[in-house]
Amino acid sequence: MVKNTPAFIWERLLTDAPPRSLSYASITDAAIRIADNEGLDAVTMRSVAAAVGSGTMSLYRYVSGKEDLLDLMLDAAWGEIPLPDAKQGNWQARLTRVAVASRQVLKAHPWLAALLTSRPTLGPNYLNWFEYLLAATAAPGRSMKTQVRMIGTTWSFVTGFVAYETAEIETDRKHGLTPAKKRKLVRPYMTQILAGGEYPFLRGFLESGPGRPTDEDFHEGLRAVLTGLAAI
């Protein structure tokens, strides 16, 4: 087991010479495959060791525990987001490209959202992502505080939108629900609630036939966010 080492795996990777039998990339890839297929709870030292054909104790030569695995997975996901030329197009176009790509990665890895707020984002891929966004939003006379607000607001929209998308899909999957089944299930209750006329706007919403969030919803929402940010 790793002992008397820095707290963060990224600091260790700067100085440690890794053992030769495995690679951090293979360990990370195995952990991501498990999480994609079985969920984050299925990622354990034992399951990852089995996936890479190693003993659990041998895995401790690379990582000190599950927390290290999660940090490696999180940063690998950041590395899947393509970062085009930060000087290409205006800042709205740059943020749009990264927002769209970030949504795709978040949807590809449903477990990722849980790590964004529970693990430190200090890996090299995240730092490259954040550096790119700082460069993409830099402009003469624009303060760093304004840049951070622009990035944070855009990122909050992306993660919030994806959280709604993935949560609904996961809930339907767990309970074996289709849109038709869900409507049938809630219709008696909603009919009773709406009968009193106390929720006219809710009635209008339901009568409009809302469905799951779409790509168009995402792009229109993102456009509205970026238009608002242009005013700060």
Image: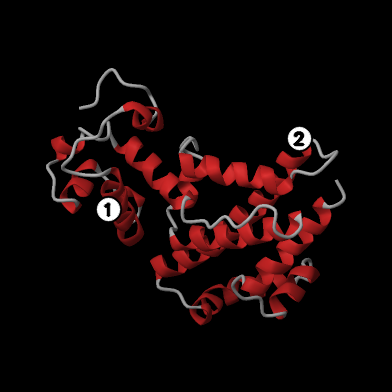
Residue at the spot 13% in from the left edge and 45% down from the top edge: 54
| Label 2 secondary element | helix
Looking at numbered disc 2 in the image, what kind of residue is underneath it? Lys
- Tell me if 17 is positioned left or right of 93 in this view: left
Residue 142: percent from left, percent from top: 82, 40
**Outermost residue, top side:** 4
Asked if 36 appears above or below 188 in the picture, the reply is: above
Residue bearing mark 2 = 145
- Tell me if 107 is positioned left or right of 3 in this view: right
Residue at the spot 79% in from the left edge and 66% down from the top edge: 198
Quarter of the picture containing the C terminus is: top right
Quarter of the picture containing the N terminus is: top left
Residue 88: percent from left, percent from top: 70, 58
Residue 118: percent from left, percent from top: 47, 38
Residue 115: percent from left, percent from top: 46, 44
Quadrant of the rendered structure where residue 7 is?
top left
The crowd level at tag 2 (other Cα within 10 Å; few <14, some 14-19, many 20+) is few
Asked if 111 appears above or below 216 in the picture, the reply is: above
- Tell me if 82 is positioned left or right of 57 in this view: right
Q: Nearer the viewer, residue 162 or 181?
A: 162
Residue at the spot 56% in from the left edge and 46% down from the top edge: 129
Mark 2 and mark 1 lie on one chain; the one further toward the N terminus is 1
Residue bearing mark 1 = 30
Q: Which colour scheme is used?
A: secondary structure
Q: Nearer the viewer, residue 220 or 11?
A: 11
Residue at the spot 64% in from the left edge and 61% down from the top edge: 97
Looking at numbered disc 1 in the image, what kind of residue is underneath it? Ala
- Tell me if 95 is positioned left or right of 115 in this view: right
Separation of residues labelled 2 and 1 (CA atoms) = 39 Å
Q: How many marks?
A: 2
Q: Nearer the viewer, residue 128 or 48?
A: 128
| Label 1 secondary element | helix
